[in-house]
Amino acid sequence: EFNHAIRSLLSATLDSNDIGQVNPFDGVRLMGYIEFDDRGQLISGRSFIRIEVHDSFVGQVQDGHRIEPIVIQVPVTAARFVSGYQFEVRAEDQHGWILLQGIDQYGRFVGQLSFRNTNGRWGEGLSFEIETCGFFRCHK
């Protein structure tokens, strides 16, 4: 089920035959950066979500080239506090959108990832956890 969801996410730009098996424990790395200005408004030109997929093909050599992880980087178009420590982050480009909904729990942004591609493929309920200050610009 996890591999099906990852293949659906990547289907906007890749054929599923080009994607190997993905380990659900360490095969996907979620990164990003979200910055707000002094008024609390999103600085969209500097904010993005990056997903690296390390499938079973990574590291193999094909046609003389080492296979690298599959990378999706999507600009953040909206980010807001829903209430208290709950966040909602939306990233969107010509291939579709990704939505992160979660809560800040003791310095960890924990939640669910959903997506919908322009090709009609979608997914929801993919769990994630990332350091809050490694994702949101935290003021010390």
Image: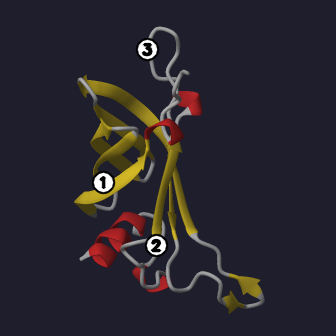
Residue, x 36% and y 70% (percent of image)?
6
C-alpha span from label 3 to label 1: 25 Å
> In the current view of this chain or complex, which residue is farthest to the top?
39
Q: Is residue 5 left or right of residue 91?
A: left
Q: How is the image coloured?
A: secondary structure
Residue 46 location, quadrant: top right
The amino acid type of the residue labelled 1 equals Phe
Q: Amino acid at mark 2?
A: Gly
In which image quadrant can residue 60 be found? bottom right
Of labels 3 and 1, earlier in sequence is: 3
Instruction: Say which mark, if any, is on residue 115.
Output: 1
The residue identified by callout 2 is 27
Q: Nearer the viewer, mark 1 or mark 2?
A: 2
Q: Which secondary structure, mark 1?
A: strand
Q: Is residue 1 left or right of residue 79?
A: left
Of residues 63 and 120, the one drawn nearer to the viewer in this rendering: 63
Q: Vertical placement of 119 versus 108: above or below?
A: below
**Which corner quadrant holds the C terminus?**
top right
Is residue 117 shown to the viewer in this render?
no
Kindly indicate whether the residue at mark 2 contacts the one at mark 1 (C-beta within 8 angstroms): no
Residue at position x 29%, y 76% in the image = 4
Q: Earlier in the sequence, mark 2 or mark 3?
A: 2
- How much space separates mark 2 and mark 3, taking CA atoms? 34 Å
User: Residue sitting at 31 percent across and 39 percent down?
Assistant: 105
SS at badge 3: loop
Residue 45 at x, y = what percent?
Answer: 58, 29
Check disc 3 and report the residue beneath it. Answer: 40
> Which is nearer the N-term, disc 1 or disc 2?
2
